[in-house]
Image: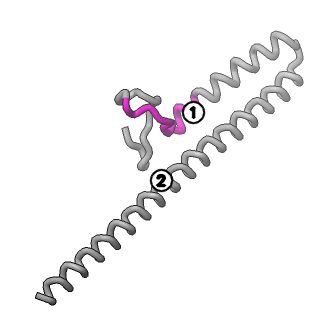
Amino acid sequence: MMVNGLRVGWPGAHHASDCKWEAMSFLLFLRGFIIVLLAFAIGTYLLTASLWSTFVQTAICGILIQIGYFVAVMLMVWRSVSKESVIEKADIQRDESEREQLRSHLAHKADQ
């Protein structure tokens, strides 16, 4: 499925040959983020029995998850930009070689 030009879903969900990292929708991320933080907060409270410690450690966990999500998104953007630039360069080289072939063909016809 495509959302804003990005494929959404799990790696390999569409076809076996499509095994690559894919974008995750924000709502799916938010739901997982809240579930993980709740589980972490419950576990921390059961271990420490301190609301303050649970709050601080859960906030740190949330910040670390956000940093990881940001890095993952930046890597996906970087990879998509680098792939597009390689494709564009290949297209430019192909176009130049086609122009060169056309020029030599026209020059050959003009000589005849």
Query: Residue at 38% of width from left, 42% of height from top?
Result: 2
Q: Which of 65 and 12 is in front in this view?
A: 12
- Kind of residue at badge 1: Phe
* Circle nearer the N terminus (2, 1): 1
Q: Is residue 24 above or below residue 51?
A: below
Q: Nearer the viewer, residue 61 or 97?
A: 97
Q: Which colour scheme is used?
A: one colour
Q: Nearer the viewer, residue 100 or 4?
A: 100
How far across and how far down the image is residue 81, in percent?
51, 56
Q: Which residue lies furthest to the bottom in this view?
A: 111
- The dot on residue 83 is 2
How far across and how far down the image is residue 106, in percent?
18, 83
Q: What element carries label 2?
A: helix
Residue 111 figure quarter: bottom left
Residue 70 figure quarter: top right
Q: Is residue 92 above or below residue 48?
A: below
Which residue corresponds to mark 1? 29
**Labels 2, 1: front one:** 2
Q: How crowded is the residue under tag 1: few (<14 C-alpha within 10 Å), some, or many (20+)?
A: few
Number of numbered tags placed on the structure image: 2
Query: Residue at 66% of width from left, 43% of height from top?
Result: 71
Residue 22 among those drawn in magenta: yes
Q: What stretch is highlighted in magenta?
A: 17-31
- Kind of residue at badge 2: Lys
Query: Residue at 40% of width from left, 62% of height from top?
Result: 90
Q: Residue furthest front?
A: 112
Report the quarter where the C terminus lies.
bottom left
